[in-house]
Amino acid sequence: MLTLQLDALTTVALALLLLAMGAQLKKHSYWLRQLCVPAPVIGGFGFALVVWLLRDQQWLDIKLDTAMQTPLMVAFFTTVGLGGSLGLLRQGGKILFIYLGACWGLALLQNLVGVGMAKALGIDPLLGIMAGAVSLEGGFGAAAAFGPIAESLGTVGATTAALASATFGMVAGGLLGSPVARYLIERKKLVVQADQVDALQALEKANETPVVSIDTPVLLRLLTCMLVIMVLGFWIGDALKAHLGIVLPVYVGAMFVAILARNFNDRARVIEIPDNAVSTLGDISLGMFLTMAMMSLKFWELEQLGLPLLVILVVQVLIMVLLCIFVLFRLFGGNYDAAVLCAGYMGHGLGATPNAVANMGAICDHYKVFSYKAFIIVPLCGAVLIDIVALPLITWFINAFS
């Protein structure tokens, strides 16, 4: 079988092409618009299917260099921070803790379902754990870390099962999150207004910041600001790891530095940061890194699942959907922000933070109302604070049922 190795620049160019194609397909497809399927998912998912087909037929194996995916992700969360405020974090205090509790509870629930279903189906309980919080809420990182541990305890094929389950979860989380949120919004006839809209409008009037044309000086100023913030974020992350042993996702430091910079600049007015320019760069960064994430899906790993694991994963997905619709939506506030939070919860609860961001972005783009609260709470809880409870829970379950 021939192998085609694409370098980083070619991979970025291909991601842009697929993103544009996905946007056009969504523009001309009524059902894709109604389901709020993100354009990066359309383009990247389609490419991953083609790669799977070519590989399955032993014609061609396409390998990607996704070195630019992480910088693009950090760039997007930097723009989220530049649009946020510390007051917003205080506003979301109660919901933040409720959301975090829901994340911790999901880690326990997914493991209980995995173990229970595995015993009912007559397979090793550790395989059920691999199809639980390890691969779903934990994602590829936890699957790669805990799979070998389960194998060392005698569970044959645990790593393959965990990685295949993570792929299944990534696909399910990316495809179902936005439709669930849209169902909630339409079914409940919600007022499409984020909690912080009034405050942001008041701030805009006070600062009298008009929409400006995005020309070379504006882009140069904003890109310089973003890159400096990203570098500071990387330095903070490295310092926390080196001196305190705290490991954070790479985008967290940059997002918080950006929030501090935005709030300081609102008072000191050092430079002009046009919101429309920030939003434009954020949309581009988001689209590119999500497309690259979807392009990298390895569908052939799903062939390793087998019927028992597939049954467990289908049950896990159904429980997630029912949980969001009948329980979490009300706990999160029962409003537009709550629906966006449910989209994010579906994304990282089954896949990863990029899924959550894609789901929330698709909903906000469809209704033309951006939920800053959701875009700050979901990444913070789903990728950082959740591990405080999730990782010890996974470790306990593996030891208890080995």
Image (cartoon, grey):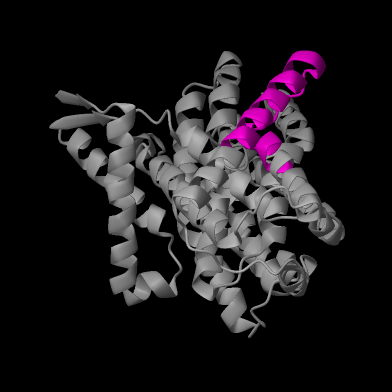
Q: Nearer the viewer, residue 225 or 131?
A: 225
Q: Nearer the viewer, residue 172 or 198?
A: 198
Is 71 placed above or below 279 here? above
Classify residue 7 as left or right of residue 354.
Answer: left
| Quarter where residue 127 is shown | top right
Quadrant location of the N terminus in the rendered image: top left
Q: Residue at x 80, y 50 (%)?
A: 268
Q: Is residue 249 above or below residue 92?
A: above
Q: Quadrant of the C terminus?
A: top right
Q: Is residue 40 visible?
A: yes
Number of on-image labels: 0
Q: Is residue 121 visible?
A: no
Q: Nearer the viewer, residue 74 or 247?
A: 74
Point out residue 323 in the picture as x, y percentages from the top left corner.
Answer: 67, 62
Splitting the image into 4 quarters, where does residue 61 fall? top left
Q: Tell me where residue 227 appears, x and y as whole percent.
A: 57, 35
Q: Is residue 298 left or right of residue 147?
A: left
Q: Position of residue 30 (x, y in %)?
A: 34, 77
Q: Work out which residue is located at the far bottom of the displayed protein and give it.
A: 189
> Which region shows up in magenta?
227-256
Q: Is residue 261 above or below residue 33?
A: above
Overall secondary structure of the magenta stretch? helix
Residue at left offset 86%, top offset 56%:
90
